[in-house]
Amino acid sequence: MGSIINSINNGNIVINGIPEVFDLSCFAYAGSGTISNCINTGSIQAKGTDIFGTFVCESFGTISNCLNTGTIIGENIASAFAAKVYAHNDPEFAKSEIKNCLNIGYVSGNNKVGALFGEFINNESNPNGTASVKNTIS
């Protein structure tokens, strides 16, 4: 569990498929920690990837006070914030949460696409898992 705080991406990024790398993110691959006060203004084209989330690919933690104004173009699962959000009640992890975030960018892809998250996953062994989206605008 770590933190990414006050980080900014202003660059335009084009990913043209990296062999055997299918899940990508600008800020973090997966995390149960916190991503806060981060900004993406760059346009990102994630071609040849399966999963792309601008701030995190797979989220088990909290994304808060983040802003995306960039254009995000993914292949399969794509999102301006988290490609996949996991619900759980495991005390080792913080509750999955996206709060106080703003997306005014364009997001597109071919399958599961969302400005906030592309896919929501509830743990089958613990179907009462929780995740939340609060005070977030897209």
Image (tube, grey):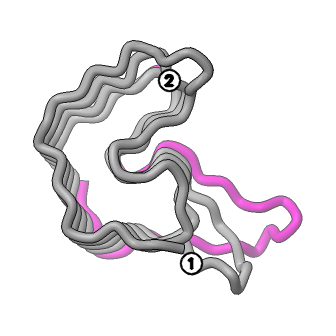
Q: Secondary structure at mark 1?
A: loop
Q: Residue at x 34, y 73 (%)?
A: 99
> Disc 1 or 2, which lies upstream in sequence?
2
Question: Is 54 displayed left or right of 31 in the figure?
Answer: left
Q: Residue at x 63, y 78 (%)?
A: 93
Name the mark on residue 114. Answer: none
Q: Position of residue 73 (x, y in %)?
A: 32, 26
The reply to whether residue 113 is visible in this rendering is no
Q: Residue at x 17, y 54 (%)?
A: 8
Question: Is 58 displayed left or right of 87 in the figure?
Answer: left
- For label 1, the residue is 95
Q: Secondary structure at mark 2?
A: loop
The image quarter in which residue 114 lies: top left
Mark 1 near mark 2, Cβ–Cβ under 8 Å? no
**Residue stretch rendered in magenta on the structure:** 110-138
**Residue placed most toward the observer, 132 or 96:** 96
**Residue placed most toward the observer, 95 or 31:** 31
Any magenta on residue 133? Answer: yes
CA distance for labels 1 and 2: 27 Å
Q: Position of residue 24 (x, y in %)?
A: 46, 36
Of the residues shown, which amino acid type is indicated by label 2? Thr
Crowding at mark 2 (Cα within 10 Å: few <14, some 14-19, many 20+): many
Any magenta on residue 95? Answer: no
Q: Position of residue 21 (x, y in %)?
A: 56, 26
Q: Is residue 115 above or below residue 35?
A: above
Crowding at mark 1 (Cα within 10 Å: few <14, some 14-19, many 20+): many
